[in-house]
């Protein structure tokens, strides 16, 4: 028996989980998703996850497939069934199955709801200790990047370009300014100040970003919420990225150029320490 997944009210072996070809998620990418980190067997950042998931569902006029507490109970049960100690849980809701392939939203559909777990080292990893390489890539995505939509072809193309050039991540560029990472939020540090783009339709409202921006000023780290250019990133003292299952990774090289002295910087290291401490407290450790 393989890992269990959740699909429309059932916990199934992943090989047994099937979705009809007429599901609008498959045909039209008509759906949203989320990834929640798991540390020591427990989900963290739960309330921000619920808030962002609700926001994305509302943006696409999608209903919750079940009450929120029931949704959390389902995710916790799935983590338990698969014995995940560290990693994450992915969950997705689409508009459901319609035998009419139309662009408008058909009425009366039952949403398709699925979830699966995965294992990944979050607290300790070589990337967190040593840093990662980033390549700048053109941002070719749609204009509602604030919705965590399952339509991710633009990100896939950008990631492929970055990986082909030997980078861990791509930082997407629009009109000379960095928007965000392919699958992460982007930051630079200059003279001790943390710089990242303010929220708008141009970027996803990252949950790790939200929590880091709450932690930083509490610990004497000055914030600048503004766009920054590729050239500024080249000249930064430090740079880093954040996402659900990286928490914070230092960026030590951008487009083949070392960031600062080419090693993880003190602000980046301190923010990761603070975030990990907060995550462990939430996990009850």
Image: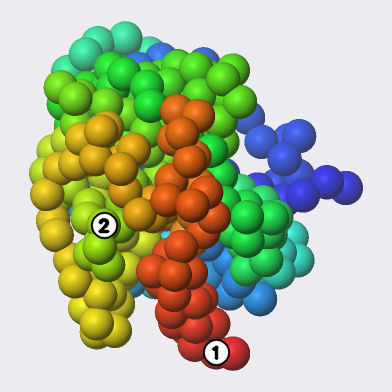
Specify the label residue 16 is tagged with: none
Specify the label residue 190 is tagged with: 2
Q: In which quarter of the image is residue 104?
A: top left
From what the image shows, is residue 176 above or below residue 270?
above
Of the pair 124 and 112, the residue shown nearer to us? 124
Q: Where is residue 241 in the image (x, y as percent from the top left)?
A: 42, 50
Q: In which quarter of the image is residue 70?
A: bottom left
* Outermost residue to the right: 1
* Number of residues whose C-alpha sits closer than 10 Å to that of mark 2, classed few (under 14), some (14–19) or many (20 or more): some
Residue 116 vs residue 266: left or right? right
From what the image shows, is residue 63 above or below residue 267?
above
Residue on which disc 1 sits: 284
What residue is shown at x 37% (from left), y 22% (from top)? 137
**Disc 2 on helix, strand or loop?**
strand
What residue is shown at x 17% (from left), y 66% (from top)? 223
Q: Distance between the residues labelled 1 and 2?
A: 35 Å
From what the image shows, is residue 136 above or below residue 202?
above
The colouring scheme, among rainbow, by chain, secondary structure or one colour, is rainbow
Q: Where is residue 190 in the image (x, y as percent from the top left)?
A: 26, 57
Q: In which quarter of the image is residue 24?
A: top left
Asked if residue 98 can be seen in this view, the reply is: no
* Outermost residue to the front: 261
Q: Position of residue 68 (x, y in %)?
A: 35, 66
The answer to which of marks 1 and 2 sits earlier in the sequence is 2
Of the pair 136 and 55, the residue shown nearer to us? 136
Q: Which one is closest to the eye, mark 1 or mark 2?
A: 2
**Disc 1 on helix, strand or loop?**
loop
Residue 55 vs residue 235: left or right? left
* Number of residues whose C-alpha sits closer than 10 Å to that of mark 1, classed few (under 14), some (14–19) or many (20 or more): few
């Amino acid at each position: 028996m393989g890992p269990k997944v959740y699909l429309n009210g059932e916990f199934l072996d992943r090989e047994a989980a099937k979705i009809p070809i007429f599901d609008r998620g498959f045909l039209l990418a008509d759906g949203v998703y989320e990834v929640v980190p798991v540390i020591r067997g427990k989900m963290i950042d739960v309330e921000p996850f619920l808030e962002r998931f609700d926001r994305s569902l509302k943006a696409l006029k999608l209903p919750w497939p079940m009450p929120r507490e029931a949704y959390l109970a389902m995710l916790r049960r799935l983590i338990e069934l698969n014995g995940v100690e560290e990693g994450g849980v992915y969950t997705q809701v689409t508009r459901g199955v319609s035998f009419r392939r139309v662009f408008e939203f058909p009425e009366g559909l039952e949403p398709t709801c699925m979830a699966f777990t995965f294992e990944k080292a979050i607290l300790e990893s070589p990337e967190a200790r040593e840093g990662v390489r980033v390549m700048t890539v053109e941002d070719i995505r749609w204009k509602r990047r604030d919705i965590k939509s399952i339509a991710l072809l633009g990100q896939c193309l950008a990631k492929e370009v970055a990986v082909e050039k030997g980078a861990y991540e791509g930082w997407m560029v629009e009109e000379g300014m960095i928007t965000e990472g392919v699958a992460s939020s982007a930051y630079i540090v200059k003279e001790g100040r943390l710089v990242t783009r303010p929220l708008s339709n141009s970027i996803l409202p990252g949950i790790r970003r939200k929590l880091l921006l709450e932690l930083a000023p509490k610990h004497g780290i000055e914030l600048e919420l503004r766009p920054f250019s590729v050239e500024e990133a080249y000249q930064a003292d430090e740079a880093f990225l954040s996402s659900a299952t990286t928490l914070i990774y230092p960026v030590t090289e951008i487009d083949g150029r070392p960031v600062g002295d080419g090693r993880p910087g003190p602000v980046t290291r301190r923010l990761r320490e603070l975030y990990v401490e907060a995550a462990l407290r939430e996990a009850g450790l």
